[in-house]
Image: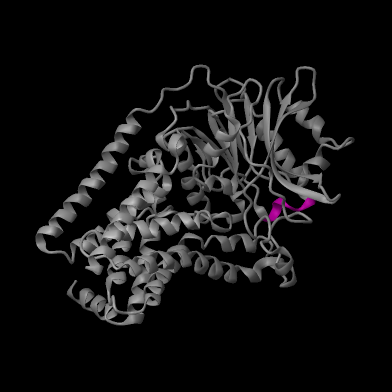
Amino acid sequence: MERFLKAYAGLEANPWGRRGLALLAGLAAALAHPPFGVLPGLLGFAVILRLADRDAARPLAFGFSIGWFAGLGYFALSVWWVTEAFLVDAASHGWMAPFALVLLAGGLALFWGGGVWLYRAIRPQGIGRVVVFAGALALFEWIRGHVFTGFPWNLPGEAWRAGGAPSQAAALVGAYGLTWITVLLAASPAVAATAPRRAARGVAAAALAGLALLYAGGFWRLATAPPPRDQAPVVRIVQADIDQKDKWRPENLDLIFGEYLELSARAPAAGRTPDLVIWPEGALPAVLDDLLAPGQPYPEALNAAFAPGQVLMLGANRVDVGPGGGFDYFNTLVAFERQETGGLRVLGVYDKHRLVPFGEYLPLGDLMTRLGLRSLVHMPEDFTAGPPPAPLTLAGLPVVQPLICYEALFPRFAAGAAARAGVRPEWILNVSNDAWFGATSGPLQHLNLASYRAIEEGLPLVRSTPTGVSGVIDSRGRLAEDAHLGLGARGVIDAPLPAPAAPTLFARFGNWGFAIMLLISASMAVGAFIRRGQ
């Protein structure tokens, strides 16, 4: 231990050593997220705060570099799975993989650099500086989730396993508020280590009390989950385990369609025919309009495979004529009902509203195209964003809010849709194509992040992916042990739809709790300015 402390002190004494320590601290913090779940890694925020407090006389740019290196470590480990998407079609996109990781992690790290820069600019003193640090970093995480369409992947507040006790605080203050709380608690040891003994004890006691409250409140909420629905609809999730490298080969269409059809028509284990069958995002390697065109065998096969009254919700790509006369392509979820008299009736259509930059569309498309870049979408053109989202009302089924893939990252996305429509959904459906990311950490992290939307809204969430993880998640964010399929599994999940809970405080008031936290941090910052001016 003594040797370790000496080595640490030697690194901390050198400017580049401090940057290296910041990089390691960011890596440690990222280890708290799935699939690692190393919660002590969150103490990396204490190291970042300690490094940010060193050499207050150095230029603010040095503080930015500490935050940037910490963010680089955090995001490199958090988003390395993105390279898998470029290897699906390695001949066309493989060369982009290392550049994509460097640019994405380095770009996201700019927000952490901004957070530490702001903290250094305020120059707070005393034990209250941890509150300022939490506010500065959480503010820039909120900005990360909104600027340039936003990319709120692995917010520090979402490091807690969804469905566990600490994660339940998201029902009160959302993922951004929980980020403020997480950074505050995790960075507190840096203040306790440098404060006078009495103050240090107070900081340690307050941090432990806050952590205990986080767990106690979470356990109470988990114990008060709503009981199962009476006569709950039975949902069947189909996971065909089709590798992304095989999926978009046109010659595989009949094979893939047959896989989904066979799984959909399986006899239910419990004897009750599913009311609703769900296929994941972009399930088939064809445009929906071509599949359903006159003379195609697919509508008749669907008609034969489903019972009258059954509903199929199918993730697909569709094409429409745009305002200029050209074609617009949409990433779509379509609900069909098998009619009593035969044939399929369209009950509802949801077009993805929040598209993935570089995956589904190219920002600055003309410039990027001239540079030789193109989006990863398997369409002649980029996708077009659908209209602002709204819940779907399907005959005989509870009102649902669809979230296609990336949309499940965004707090308040479902609540905003409900407010616009004036109707609260009773459940959330997240269809996603995580096959892009293979057997990496990406699908496991995506599951965790999507589950936070269930906690925030107090709504059950059903998740359907082609290669895992698919499953049924209750209004507390818990993945049902007997109703999920892991990575690389093929099969179906038949499960009753869990009951919704009453609207949470976050669903009703949004980020007001987070705003109050930022005001607390701002008041500490103002106090620092006043004391410095005296």
In magenta segment, residue 249: yes
* Residue 299 placement: quadrant: top right
- Single out the residue that lies furthest toward the left: 198
In magenta segment, residue 235: no
Q: How is the image coloured?
A: one colour
Indicate the quadrant containing the N terminus: top left, top right, bottom left or bottom right. Answer: bottom left
Residue at 42%, 63% in the rendered image: 74
The image position of residue 452, as x and y in percent, is 45, 42
Residue at 20%, 63% in the rendered image: 126
The image position of residue 377, as x and y in percent, is 70, 56
Task: Provide the residue span drawn in magenta.
Answer: 245-250
Residue 21 visible at all: yes
* Residue 82 placement: quadrant: bottom right
- Single out the residue that lies furthest toward the front: 534
Magenta-colored segment: predominant secondary structure: helix
In this rendering, is residue 120 above or below 440? below
- Name the residue nearer the viewer: 256 or 157: 157
In this rendering, is residue 235 above or below 438? above
Residue at 45%, 68% in the rendered image: 72
- Name the residue nearer the viewer: 510 or 428: 510
- Please give left or right for residue 14 compared with residue 199 in the image: right
* Residue 6 placement: quadrant: bottom left
Residue 187 visible at all: no
The image position of residue 498, as x and y in percent, is 49, 27
Residue at 73%, 28% in the rendered image: 305
- Please give left or right for residue 423 compared with residue 319 in the image: left
- Please give left or right for residue 313 compared with residue 7 in the image: right
In this rendering, is residue 64 above or below 399? below
Indicate the quadrant containing the C terminus: top left, top right, bottom left or bottom right. Answer: bottom left
